[in-house]
Image (tube, grey):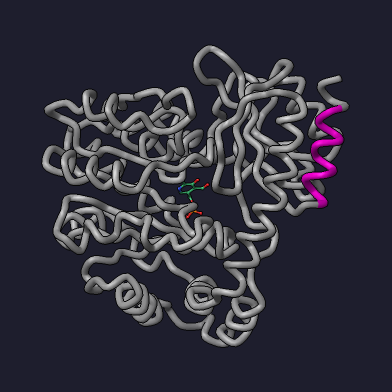
């Protein structure tokens, strides 16, 4: 049977130049991040029957308030959503203490990462990031012929800011920092990151992806938004897909200087928002109970996984988010095959000559089931 990926590849290949289309199709969907994933594939046929610990989603979402807002907003489904998008933009701007011109919405933050990556390529520059990290922006940049300079994480699996500062070059257009990082869930010291952004912002735009920042208590104090307000050359990226549990409703945003955002927006498709997503996002913003509940339950379930890893004496990044990264104890392809057979989807990464497991945090029950199954897989 033809898979969606094969279908898209052949459709693109028929419609445009063959080699570019094939590789672009690979990047348009979640790309394998290891040899094991290339061999095994990353789109399980029975995904809907698996416990999904592969995409750092929120198992508790959407919140009750978001669900009600979606239902209430469904009657607007016959209307284009640009007016509602403008309203949400204003609400976000007011919450963050910036002007609406400092905010750009996207169909998920992925859209904004892709557009930024594309801009780097079109401007003929390069992008610098840690490795491993969430690679979508860089994948788009390299598709558009930009160079991607990578700096390994330090021994604690945290961004090595000093090494990154030394790696900035004359043609670096974007310095990409994910805080907390995906796949490791590790977080940077706020003051160190601020100084880095201020200094490096003089040389290139520092793009700080804060997709997971709301997992931290008092995250507002740890965000880099203040630097945007102070006029620095910084972009902050957020999403409704993680703590707010709206991954399938596709709303994200960036906060930055208006001229920088205008350049990114100039390549954006028109009308990329949907009424349901916008309604759910607006209702979620003030839903502090849901955010606190997610944080608390996520921390409990994450602790269960930490305890398991500690009992095995395996090292791992000290995650503050809903994802944990640890060295694969047996070969990655077997892990993918066997965990899937037992009903769990996880990811395997290649990094520093080794294979690593990336496990998203589900409910406590799911994590209990996972550690039991994983233990049998590696026995
Ligand atoms: C760091 C980071 N940024 C952005 C995204 C994309 O999220 P979305 O497009 O759903 O907003 C992800 C998804 O896993 C992520 O891990």
- Residue at the image point whose x is 24% and y is 36% from the top: 121
Image side of residue 216 versus residue 200, left or right = right
Query: Where is 260 relative to 354, above or below?
Result: below
Nearer the observer, 62 or 197: 197
Image side of residue 45 versus residue 61, left or right = right
Image side of residue 187 versus residue 198, left or right = right
- Residue at the image point whose x is 20% and y is 28% from the top: 168
Nearer the observer, 245 or 361: 361
Query: Where is 11 relative to 334, above or below?
Result: below
Image side of residue 273 versus residue 64, left or right = left
- Residue at the image point whose x is 36% and y is 81% from the top: 87
Q: Main secondary structure of the magenta part?
A: helix
Residue farthest top in this picture:
353
Residue 9 seen anywhere in this rendered image of the structure = no
Q: Quadrant of residue 280?
A: bottom right
- Residue at the image point whose x is 62% and y is 25% from the top: 315
Q: Which contiguous range is marked in magenta?
A: 365-375
Q: Quadrant of residue 372?
A: top right
Q: Is residue 286 magenta?
A: no
Tally of numbered discs: 0
Residue 84 location (% of width, % of height) = 40, 80
Query: Where is 71 relative to 172, above or below?
Result: below
From the image, which quarter does the N terminus lie in? top right
Residue 357 seen anywhere in this rendered image of the structure = yes
Q: Is residue 373 magenta?
A: yes
Nearer the observer, 88 or 218: 218
Residue 146 location (% of width, % of height) = 26, 30
Residue 110 location (% of width, % of height) = 43, 50
Nearer the observer, 327 or 154: 154
Query: Where is 209 relative to 129, above or below?
Result: below
């Amino acid at each position: 049977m033809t898979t969606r990926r094969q279908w898209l590849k052949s459709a693109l290949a028929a419609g445009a130049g063959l080699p570019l289309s094939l590789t672009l199709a690979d990047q348009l969907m979640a790309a394998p991040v290891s040899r094991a994933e290339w061999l095994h594939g990353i789109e399980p046929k029975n995904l809907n029957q698996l416990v999904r610990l592969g995409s750092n989603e929120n198992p508790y979402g959407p919140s009750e308030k978001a669900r009600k807002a979606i239902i209430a907003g469904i009657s607007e489904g016959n209307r284009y959503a640009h007016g509602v998008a403008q309203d949400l933009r204003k609400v976000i701007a007011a919450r963050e203490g910036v002007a609406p011109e400092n905010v750009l919405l996207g169909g998920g933050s992925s859209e904004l990462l892709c557009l930024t990556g594309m801009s780097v390529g079109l401007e003929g520059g390069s992008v610098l990031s840690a490795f491993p990290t969430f690679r979508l922006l860089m994948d788009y940049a390299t598709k558009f012929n930009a160079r991607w300079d990578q700096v390994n994480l330090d021994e604690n699996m945290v961004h090595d800011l000093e090494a990154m500062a030394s790696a900035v070059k004359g043609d670096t257009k974007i310095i990409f920092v994910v805080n907390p990082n995906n796949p490791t869930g590790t977080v940077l010291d706020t003051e160190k990151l601020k100084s880095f952004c201020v200094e490096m912002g003089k040389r290139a735009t520092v793009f700080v992806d804060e997709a997971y920042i709301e997992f931290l208590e008092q995250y507002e104090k740890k965000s880099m938004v203040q630097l945007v307000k102070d006029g620095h050359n910084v972009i902050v990226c957020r999403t409704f897909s993680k703590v707010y549990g709206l991954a399938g409703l596709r709303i994200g945003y960036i906060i930055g200087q208006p001229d920088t955002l205008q350049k990114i927006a100039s390549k954006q498709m028109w009308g990329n928002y949907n009424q349901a997503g916008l309604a759910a996002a607006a209702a979620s913003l003030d839903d502090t109970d849901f955010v606190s509940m997610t944080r608390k339950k996520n921390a409990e379930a994450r602790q269960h996984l930490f305890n398991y890893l500690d009992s095995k004496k395996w090292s791992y990044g000290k995650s503050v988010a809903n994802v944990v990264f640890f060295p694969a104890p047996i070969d990655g392809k077997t892990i993918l095959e066997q965990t899937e057979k037992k009903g769990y989807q996880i990811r395997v990464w290649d990094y520093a000559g080794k294979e690593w497991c990336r496990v998203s945090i589900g409910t406590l029950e799911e994590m209990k089931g996972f550690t039991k199954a994983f233990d049998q897989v590696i026995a």
